[in-house]
């Protein structure tokens, strides 16, 4: 059954506005201008997908498949998918490692053509086989080099509940906000923080940069801010998409860094985040 909200003119307008906003965020970034291009993205590419030689081998095997394989159409489709998605991810939107994943996986899968179907087919004096063996050796080296990274990632995820800073900060927040226990409060938290729903907390989050207008409009009782976001947006090299708006954003984050947000009182700070409570509640924390 069709959703009556989406069929209504108001619903369609709202949907279009959301679509335009999300598209703008992908193309321009969240409040500040992000560098684009392969050189700017390369550190993340290398960290998550492998070195240049490995990726060049994957590209070469795809091109070889288009030229020599008996499954030319399959390799051509992979190439036709990989090229436009890569251009989009590297040069049109700002790069996130997960954005490139659908294209990179398809490309890397073509490395399978290096595996000899039968060992007896290997003829060391044929140049194709020599190239095949060399490329396969480099892929194996890449696998060995990434072994340590893979183990670290697996262990980090396995022990995430024990070591995750956002979970540890949430525990600190509960302790710091104990004087408000039992009261219904409205809490703002930065998007990458861990803040589960509770009966007493009405929570709000946004990927947009903060400013005093947004804070006063929502009249939050508690602000949970990430230290890293403050550092990112006060970076002297950061350039705002909208200059005037970014000045207001930086004013808020500058005040937060100085622990003097208008209308709020700081009750806790560590290397991960800050906790501010509305001045109305400050008396509960000074007794």
Image (cartoon, rainbow, N blue to C red):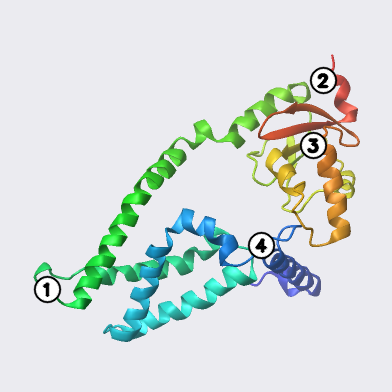
Q: Earlier in the sequence, mark 4 or mark 2?
A: 4
Q: What secondary structure is found at the residue carrying circle 1?
A: helix
Read off the residue under disc 1.
Answer: 121
Counting from the top left corner in percent of width and height, residue 71 is at 30, 83
Q: Is residue 151 left or right of residue 209?
A: left
Read off the residue under disc 2.
Answer: 285
Q: What secondary structure is found at the residue carrying circle 4?
A: loop
Q: Is residue 36 above or below residue 168?
A: below
Q: Are marks 4 and 2 in contact (CB under 8 Å)?
A: no
Q: Quadrant of residue 173?
A: top right
Q: Is residue 52 left or right of residue 98?
A: left
Question: Disc 3 vs disc 2: which is toward the camera?
Answer: 3
Q: Residue furthest left?
A: 120
Residue drawn at 89 percent across, 58 percent down = 244
Counting from the top left corner in percent of width and height, residue 97 is at 53, 58
Q: What secondary structure is found at the residue carrying circle 2?
A: helix
Q: Earlier in the sequence, mark 4 or mark 3?
A: 4
Question: Around disc 2, counting alpha carbons within 10 Å, would you say few (fewer than 14), some (14 to 19), or many (20 or more)?
Answer: some
Read off the residue under disc 4.
Answer: 35
Q: Is residue 10 at all visible to an observer of this figure?
A: yes
Q: Is residue 260 above or below residue 241?
A: above
Q: Earlier in the sequence, mark 3 or mark 2?
A: 3
User: Disc 4 and disc 2: Cα gap in Å?
Assistant: 43 Å
Read off the residue under disc 3.
Answer: 257
Q: What secondary structure is found at the residue carrying circle 3?
A: helix
Q: Is residue 84 above or below residue 36?
A: below
Q: Are marks 3 and 2 in contact (CB under 8 Å)?
A: no
Q: Earlier in the sequence, mark 3 or mark 1?
A: 1
Q: Is residue 231 left or right of residue 123?
A: right
User: Disc 3 and disc 1: Cα gap in Å?
Assistant: 66 Å
């Amino acid at each position: 059954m069709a959703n009556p909200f989406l069929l209504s003119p108001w619903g369609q307008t709202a949907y279009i506005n959301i679509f335009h906003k999300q598209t703008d965020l992908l193309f321009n970034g969240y409040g500040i201008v992000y560098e684009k291009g392969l050189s700017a993205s390369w550190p993340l590419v290398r960290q998550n997908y492998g070195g240049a030689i490995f990726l060049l081998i994957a590209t070469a095997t795809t091109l070889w498949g288009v030229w020599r394989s008996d499954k030319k159409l399959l390799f051509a489709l992979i190439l036709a998918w990989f090229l436009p998605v890569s251009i989009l991810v590297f040069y049109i939107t700002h790069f996130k490692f997960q954005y490139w994943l659908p294209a990179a996986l398809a490309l890397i899968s073509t490395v399978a053509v290096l595996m000899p179907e039968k060992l007896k087919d290997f003829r060391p004096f044929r140049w194709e086989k020599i190239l095949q063996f060399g490329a396969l050796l480099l892929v194996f080296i890449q696998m060995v080099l990434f072994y340590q990274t893979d183990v670290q990632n697996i262990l980090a995820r396995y022990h995430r509940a024990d070591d995750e800073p956002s979970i540890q900060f949430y525990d600190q927040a509960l302790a710091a906000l104990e004087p408000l226990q039992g009261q219904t409060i409205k809490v703002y938290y930065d998007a990458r923080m861990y803040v589960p729903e509770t009966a007493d907390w009405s929570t709000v989050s946004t990927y947009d940069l903060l400013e005093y207008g947004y804070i006063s409009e929502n009249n939050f009782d508690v602000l949970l801010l990430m230290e890293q976001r403050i550092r990112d947006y006060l970076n002297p090299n950061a350039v705002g998409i909208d200059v005037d708006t970014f000045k207001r954003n930086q004013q808020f984050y500058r005040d937060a860094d100085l622990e003097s947000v208008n209308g709020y009182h700081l009750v806790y700070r560590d290397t991960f985040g800050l906790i501010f409570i509305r001045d109305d509640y400050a008396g509960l924390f000074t007794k």
